Structure formats: structure tokens, C-alpha cells
Amino acid sequence: MNENEMTDLLLKLADLGVTGIKIFYSGSGDSGDIDDVVYTTTKEASFDDIMNIMNLSNYGQENTLYLADLDGYLRDDLIDFANEKILNGIEDWWNNDGGYGVMLIKIPSGEYEISNTIYVTDTEEFAHDGDLISKSLE
């Protein structure tokens, strides 16, 4: 997606009344995926305050607005771009122990913030020695 196509996507979302988007993603093993994309139409007094977008839920609450219900094509384009150009370039949240996170996008500016959590297993190595005869005498 080039700059003009991204501008067009953001303007289409704004024309539909979207003011913010929250993308939920998770993964482990060797795969990851975007789980949900929700949006808000609430206008903030200041777009520097991203808390309205952060508070969006994807757990089937009665007032949850799913981008797929508004425009599935715009959702798919946004997901493809987010995966390829942004999420694939941050800390590895899809391999090994995996991770999860959210991407918050302001509309129409396209500014985003990501909260990415990865699971890390620490490995510690120990060495022990002795002899079997001594152990059998204990």
C-alpha cells in the first residue's frame, strides 16, 4: 500500500465517522494473527488523549463496534498493512512462547501507539558432580 492508498483508507474511515481503531493481536509457536479490530466514533476534545481508544473492548459487549461490520474491505486492507509494515517489525510476539498486544490508531491522522507483550522463558543451567559410591552411603 502506497502513501496515496493509505491516505485514501484513512479518509474513508473518517467519512464513515471512525475516530479511533483498536487492533488486538496474539500468537505463539510460530504463528500469530490479528484477533479483532474495533472502532469508536467518539470525538475527543484533544486527539492527544488516546485513552478513549485504549478503553475499547473486544469481548462482545453490547456496544462494541467491529470494523468488519462497518466495512470488511477497509478492515482487511488495514489488517494487511498493520501486519506487513508495522507488527512484523516489532518484538517477536508470534514465535516460541508468543505474546499479545494492541495497536491504537487515531483517525484521520493515522498516528498509532502499540502496547506489545512478549513471553520470555529464562533458561538457567546448573552443573553437579559427585560419585555414586558416596551417594549410596548417605
Image (tube, rainbow, N blue to C red):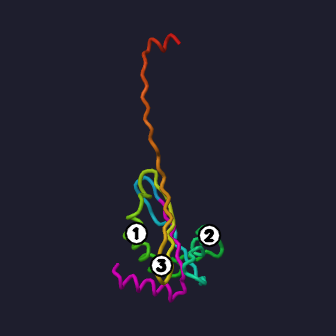
In the rendered structure, which disc, 3 or 1, sits on the residue that comes first in sequence? 3
At horizontal 48% and vertical 56% (from top left) the residue drawn is 118
Q: Which residue is mark 1?
A: 86
From the top left corner, tell me how far across and down residue 14 is, in percent: 50, 86
In the rendered structure, which disc, 2 or 3, sits on the residue that comes first in sequence? 2
Q: Residue type at mark 3? A: Gly
Q: Which contiguous range is marked in magenta?
A: 1-26
Query: Where does the N terminus fall, quadrant-wise?
Result: bottom left
In the rendered structure, which disc, 2 or 1, sits on the residue that comes first in sequence? 2
Image quarter of residue 53: bottom right
Residue sticking out furthest to the bottom: 15
User: How far is the residue under mark 2 from the one under mark 3?
Assistant: 18 Å
Does the residue at mark 2 contact the one at mark 3 (Cβ under 8 Å)?
A: no
Left or right of residue 19: residue 29: left
Q: Which residue is mark 3?
A: 72
Q: Residue type at mark 1? A: Ile
From the top left corner, tell me how far across and down residue 81 is, in percent: 39, 73
Question: Which element type, helix, strand or loop, lies under badge 1?
Answer: helix
Does the residue at mark 2 contact the one at mark 1 (Cβ under 8 Å)?
A: no
Image quarter of residue 9: bottom left
From the top left corner, tell me how far across and down residue 129 is, in percent: 42, 22
At horizontal 51% and vertical 79% (from top left) the residue drawn is 106
Q: Is residue 118 above or below residue 102?
A: above
Q: Which residue is mark 2?
A: 60
User: How far is the residue under mark 2 from the one under mark 1?
Assistant: 26 Å
Q: Looking at the image, which is closer to me, 24 or 59?
A: 24
Q: Residue type at mark 2? A: Gly
